[in-house]
Amino acid sequence: MANSILVGAQWGDEGKGKIIDFLTEKADIVVRSQGGNNAGHTVIVEGKKYVLHLIPSGILRKGTMCVIGNGVVIDAVSLAEEITGLRKKGIRVTKDNLLISDAAHLTLPHHRALDRAKETAKGAGKIGTTGRGIGPTYSDKAARTGLRTGDLMDARRFSERLKSRLTDANAQLGLLGGETVDFKQANAQYLAAAKTIIPFLGNTVVWLADAVRENKEILFEGAQGTFLDIDFGTYPYVTSSNTTAGGACTGSGVPPNRISKVWGTMKAYTTRVGEGPFPTENDELGDFLHGLGREFGATTGRARRCGWFDAVFTRYAAIVNGIDDIAVTNTDGLDTMATIKVCTAYKLGRKTLEYPPTDLDALAECKPIYEEYDGWQKDTTSARKWGDLPVKCRKYLQAIARLTGAKLSIVSVGPGREQTIVV
Ligand code: IMP
Ligand code: MG
């Protein structure tokens, strides 16, 4: 048995899609278990760019089965568009390579409207969500008022339930001053999308249990990152799902004793989109990376906030996820830097902290303690082996792995499949 989970060890956008694509060469099945189309994975294969939101990046490999688990929230309209878009690019999407849980909750038009209206109402206190309706969908799930993918199979029942949900949601939208949702239009749009999705629906728990019994290799593709986790992230500046390793089990029905390994993905520096604390944020580094055309969001196009590598957070990510091996991405982003800083601990008053404090006010007062590393000032994008990397670069990468407390196993030096070094 070699089933592994890959999580983001920072605030998302660590390059998980690319690493998953690389690791799927060996996997039989790739599973998404949480989040929704707030995620955006960019994968470049043979010069062609694919941006995936809900479908696991395993779809780009022939013979890989992709599963969307019960823990994912699905905007059926957006998923139908994603399937059609992939087919237009020549990617085969059939029942033989995509299976969707019939118990996954549906993100509906009023969830998106509520997401936006709530953000507007929060004003300066906003979270900076992707506006995809993720929070309101998970709220309905927890409140036991949600609709699930399986509900799409009976059109009449779906319409009845949608109508009843819209009555409540529109009243709430009215109070928030948001735009209300028209039942007829929403219903027609969802029933049309349902036609594309229904063939893929099934009981993914049983299917995955059979696969485990047959010794198939499963790779769980995390979305977002550890510090956007609803429990372990920088609450309330988080997303609404468990982005950490445990979420892979609850979001798929594959039990913990069937998992053998956890991979953590992290950038050679740090980025975050949306609001919330970011102790090592550095505008100069941000301007520099944006100037290279890097660090713009795949889902919303927003410029990401950038900062130095923060080992206080990645160290916490290593313990909360049980990270065994790490993949460091975007190493090439630092190629021209003269000196590179790494945050090794925080100073809070007279105390030195190895892990981030839970309280956001305390976190805001933390001062990063930095170590400086000499930049390698050489191009790494054409490196293919560990030995091809400049000595200073190797030293830097080993240092961030050591500070995190996990084994360095993969280094990525560009978006291409071939720009991946196994250490
Ligand atoms: P939501 O998930 O749209 O509710 O957004 C909540 C927070 O998570 C915001 O700060 C978003 O920018 C962030 N977020 C959600 N999905 C992603 C992602 O895939 N990458 C990076 N940040 C994300
Ligand atoms: Mg992304």
Image (cartoon, rainbow, N blue to C red):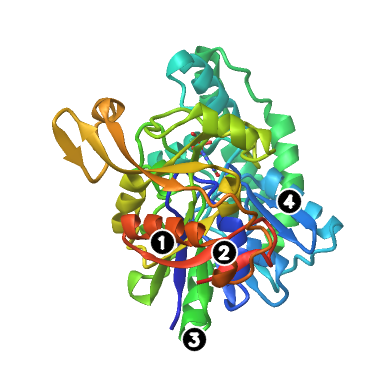
Judging from the image, what secondary structure is the residue with disc 1 in?
helix
Q: CA distance from mark 2 to mark 4?
A: 37 Å
Evaluate if marks 3 and 1 touch, with contact meaning CB atoms under 8 Å apart.
Answer: no
Q: Nearer the viewer, residue 188 or 47?
A: 47
Q: Which residue occupies the extreme left position in the image?
A: 350
**Quadrant of the snapshot with the N terminus:** bottom left
Q: CA distance from mark 3 to mark 4?
A: 30 Å
Sequence order check: which comes first, mark 3 or mark 2? 3
Q: Foreground: 287 or 258?
A: 287
Q: Which marked residue is nearer to the observer: mark 3 or mark 1?
A: 1
Residue type at numbered disc 4: Glu
The reply to whether residue 32 is in sight is yes
User: On the image, numbered disc 2 is attached to which residue?
Assistant: 389
Residue named by callout 3? 215
Rendered residue at 72%/58% (across/down): 44
The residue labelled by disc 1 is 398
Identity of the amino acid at label 2? Leu
**CB contact under 8 Å: marks 3 and 4:** no
Of residues 217 and 68, the one drawn nearer to the viewer in this rendering:
217
The image position of residue 340, as x and y in percent, is 46, 43
Cα gap from disc 1 to disc 4, whole angstroms = 38 Å
Of the numbered discs 3 and 4, the one sitting upstream in the chain is: 4
Name the disc covering residue 21, or none: none
Vertical position of residue 213 compared to residue 301: above or below = below
Neighbor class of circle 3 (other Cα within 10 Å; few <14, some 14-19, many 20+) is few
Q: Nearer the viewer, mark 3 or mark 2?
A: 2
The CA span between labels 3 and 2 is: 36 Å
Residue lying at 51% horizontally and 35% vertically, measured from the top left: 306
Q: Residues within 10 Å of mark 2 (few under 14, many from 20)?
A: many
Q: Is residue 422 left or right of residue 309?
A: right
154 is higher (above) or lower (below) than 205: above
Q: Nearer the viewer, mark 2 or mark 1?
A: 2
